[in-house]
Amino acid sequence: MAANWLEFVGSISMLISTAIALVVSFIYLIVITLSQGRNLSVSSLLASNTFLSSLIYSSVHFTIAISVLRSDIAVIDGVRNQLYNPFCMSSAFVFYSGCALLYYSYVMEAMQRFTRVVLYDYQWLHKRRVQFLFIIFQWLFCILGTFIPLSITNQLQYDIYMNMCIIPIRSSGWTMYYAIYCYTIPLVLIAYFYHHLIQYIISVRRRVSACLISGSIIVAAQRQLALIQRVIALVSILIASGLPYCAFIFMGFWMDPPVYQFRISFLCIDIALASVVCTMFCYSRDIKRLRRV
């Protein structure tokens, strides 16, 4: 007897959501590579970095979804058995690193929009080489910040309901570390940059009549303001995606979380990931430009 229908619906939903995010990310990277090649603008470079991070993150989630589905199929008389997963440890490393890469790539885009308007006079910040160096630093920061603690603490354990290796919620403070490092800090930075950007745009509007600022700054501010509404929607989805996991972490301080804690958390993350990637793809300037052609 296999798992019940609700478990199948959850695992298949995870599989479909991650497949959508994976395919959309791959299509964007192929389209940008064929259309622009090495002549990427700064905004296209940062968007490509985000979609590449999404491709990595959705790939590992797709692998996890397949493992979960295999685990559901292998249930015998309501009993789950541990299945051989050759990618158990490696998928865990890529999972935590990919999560950090994706969320910090949103930080990179927020920082670029902030510097483009607020720090308009610092033209060296808007050069492609400088942004490329920032991206390299971001990748090193995310990979080392997640890989080193996992390799030296030996906190990974096999979860029979997910058929993968992951840090148990009640194991130690390392769960809190990864929640803060991969989720809380990026969201705080994103909120910081966009909050100050909005405040700056409001102050710009107040000074327009007095002609205290140049026209180029006004144009740049107006362009960024048009993006902020979509960005707020995307950030709201990102916040909602991590709330179940954070709720289970806090629940773990006082009681045992439900056995399907990771299934619920991952399902929310997968649906949010597909929603964010599809939204970014539809509103991408590069894709809109190609549609006009």
Image (tube, helix red, strand yellow):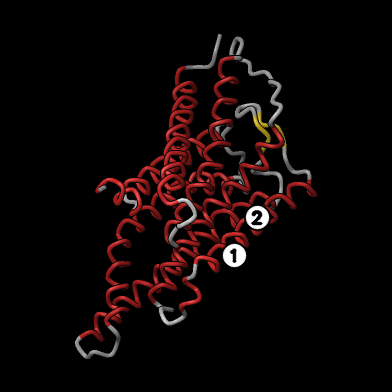
Of residue 160 and residue 198, the one placed in the foreground of this image is 198
Q: Nearer the viewer, residue 290 or 164?
A: 290
Above or below, 203 relative to 48:
below
* The label number, if any, that marks residue 133 in the structure image: 1
Q: Quadrant of residue 28?
A: top left
Tell me the kind of residue under disc 1: Leu
Residue sitting at 53 percent across and 45 percent down?
Answer: 245
Identify the mark nearer the N-term, 2 or 1: 1
Which residue sits at x=47%, y=67%?
111
Position of residue 256 measured from the top left corner of the image (x, y, whole percent): 62, 39
Question: Please, is residue 243 above or below residue 196 in the view?
Answer: above
* In the image, residue 287 above or below residue 133: above
Label 2: element kind: helix
Asked whether disc 2 touches disc 1, contact meaning CB atoms under 8 Å apart, the reply is no
Q: How many marks?
A: 2
Of residues 145 and 2, the one drawn nearer to the viewer in this rendering: 145
Drawn side of residue 101 relative to residue 144, left or right: left
Classed neighbour count for the residue bearing mark 2: other residues with Cα under 10 Å, few (<14), some (14–19), many (≥20): some
Along the line of sight, which residue is nearer the eye, 265 or 283? 283
- Would you name the residue on which mark 2 appears? 177
Count neighbours of disc 1 (C-alpha within 10 A) and say few if under 14, some if 14 to 19, many if 20 or more.
Answer: few
Q: Residue at x 63, y 52 (%)?
A: 178
Q: If the image is split into quadrants, where does the N terminus sit?
A: top right
| Label annotation for residue 273 | none
Which mark lies nearer to you, 2 or 1?
A: 1
Kind of residue sitting beneath label 2? Tyr
Q: Secondary structure at mark 1?
A: helix
Image position of 262 (left or right of 146) = left
Which of the 4 image quadrants contains residue 95?
A: top right
Q: Position of residue 172 (x, y in %)?
A: 71, 49
Q: Indicate the position of residue 130 as horizontal and vertical percent values.
A: 55, 69
